[in-house]
Amino acid sequence: MKYQRWIVALCLVAACSPAAAVGLSWESVLTFVKTLKDEASAWAVTTRQTAVAAQQQNDSRLRSEAMLASAIGAIEMADRVGQAIAAVDPAVGQPQTILCEAQTQGQLRVEALGQRDRDAARLMQSFASSRVASQAQADQAQLAQRQDTYCTVSEARAGACKLTANGMQGWDSNYAGAFSQRTLSPEGELAGYAYTATLTDTRASAAIDCTSAACMSAASGQMRVAAMSAMAANSLIGQVTDRRVPVLTGQ
């Protein structure tokens, strides 16, 4: 259809224009159309040959890269086999290097777990026996910390505090904040301690440190509450130290 439209157009030009006077014949029109068809066929063949050549080049590169990767893997495996044969322990039938690495990793894990327990113990040493001037003072300190670091979006909209772009909104009162992380940054570790303090801080006021019967009764009741809070705090602090990056500082 495309060539037929060209022929019709050329015929109209030959019949209606002065080109007819210079001898534009039907044979020349056919020759022109045949030349166009030949050129189109030649371009199609060239395009097809170029695509085939590009595909062959890509296949050749893939085969060479696969052969290179296989060769590298075989060389590395041969090196590992040679090292294992050279380092084998006849007593256990295992390479000594594997045993040394396992012992080193086990020793580091034991030291890390011990350091975690020591850190948790230091944090819990003075929890139950500490006193504050008044419980209102302790609550005020916790509220100030929340306003500075853990202000939520709703509280900021209400004008209660200023929002801090630290990604820890409400972490001092939300278990899913710090304790949903597998490892904690220093800021996340402090947020875990803040949550523990918010939940379990039942330190008694210094006013109960007296010798009267009422004071003794209040101190006894506070000790019962502190004992339960201490167990909860110990569990939460243990979870925080499990998620911290261990720093092996020794005894």
Image (cartoon, helix red, strand yellow):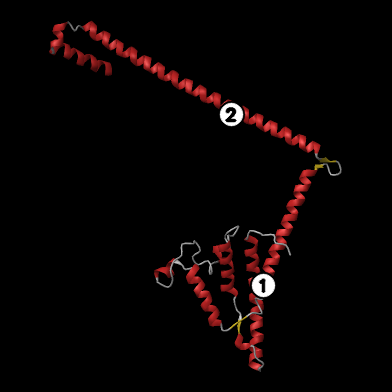
Q: Residue furthest bottom?
A: 212
In which quarter of the view is residue 215 placed? bottom right
**To which residue does mark 2 refer?**
65
Q: Is residue 175 left or right of residue 35?
A: right
* Closer to us: 187 or 171: 187
Q: Amino acid at mark 2?
A: Glu
Residue 84 at x, y percent in the picture: 78, 38
- Residue 73: in sight, yes or no? yes
Q: Is residue 232 left or right of residue 108?
A: left
Location of residue 212 with respect to 108 vertically, above or below: below
| Disc on res. 41 | none
- Identify which residue is drawn at 75% across, 48% down: 101
Query: In the displayed structure, would residue 24 be above or below residue 236?
Result: above
Residue 184 to residue 220: above or below = above
Image spot of residue 36 (x, y percent): 30, 14
Please indicate whether residue 96 sits to the left or right of residue 125 in the image: right
Q: Which residue is nearer to you in this view: 141 or 218?
A: 141
Q: Quadrant of residue 18?
A: top left
Is 8 situated above or below 187? Answer: above
Q: Residue at x 66, y 90 (%)?
A: 216
The residue carrying mark 1 is 124
**Mark 1 belongs to which amino acid?**
Met
Q: Quadrant of the C terminus?
A: bottom right
The kind of secondary structure element at disc 2 is helix
